[in-house]
Image: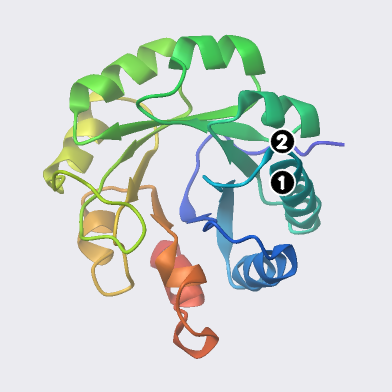
Amino acid sequence: MKPQYATHLRGLYIVTPDWDDTAQLLAATELALQNGAALVQYRHKTAGVEQRRAQASALLALCRQYDVPLIINDHVDLCLEIDADGIHVGGTDASIAEVRKAVGPERIVGASCYGTLELAHAAYRDGASYVAFGGFYPSRVKKYDFRTAPEIIAQSKREIPLPVVVIGGITLENAPPLVAQGADMVAVISSVYLVPVGERKTRELADLYR
């Protein structure tokens, strides 16, 4: 049975890297779940259909063990096929309204809003569950053509009744100012997946919300 998650999202949000080694991906994700990750997004930009299905299905089973939602980046068909908990929609993907209609009212629908409050307002009107802003800092994974001002977080919280996710080069050292602005979730890739195990700050990142 698919668990029912609270509509108020809060805590550490981890996004998977483009790893083809499924065993490595599962091991790193489980360690993050054991250390307090509150949401997992499966994102693999270069995987084929079969690999994506296999990895997402394995991650969903793992997330069920820890009662943590798994959302799929971009691929609505995959989200529906494996009965994942939601979908994250980028700015060049299908519209939020189309995705919400496709996945129904119960699933999480996240919207990338980059550094634009107008996109966040539109996402709210179209049925998003949360809005995501970024990048805030230089990222090892995603290249941004801009830097998002931290003040957009507080402004969004004042104007839009949705949780705010922040992403882009976030580390334990630079996350606190964004949390202080009102960020409900900090989303990370590198700080969990792309550093040696001994240097991971997963528990400390999760503890920003305790």
Above or below residue 152? Residue 199 is below
Residue drawn where x is 35% and y is 27% of the image: 91
Looking at the rendered image, the disc whose residue lies closer to the viewer, 1 or 2, is 1
Residue topped by disc 1: 56
Q: Residue 84 carries which label?
A: 2
Whether residue 131 sits left or right of residue 76 in the image: it is: left
Dot 2, how many residues are within 10 Å of its Cα: few (below 14), some (14-19), or many (20+)?
many
Report whether residue 207 is seen: no
Three-letter amino acid code of the residue under disc 1: Ala
Residue drawn where x is 66% and y is 42% of the image: 48
Q: Residue 113 carries which label?
A: none
Above or below residue 124? Residue 89 is below
Residue 72 drawn at (x, y percent): 60, 38
Whether residue 82 sits left or right of residue 164 in the image: it is: right
In-front residue for pair 65/62? 62
Residue 125 drawn at (x, y percent): 37, 11
Q: Distance between the residues labelled 1 and 2?
A: 9 Å
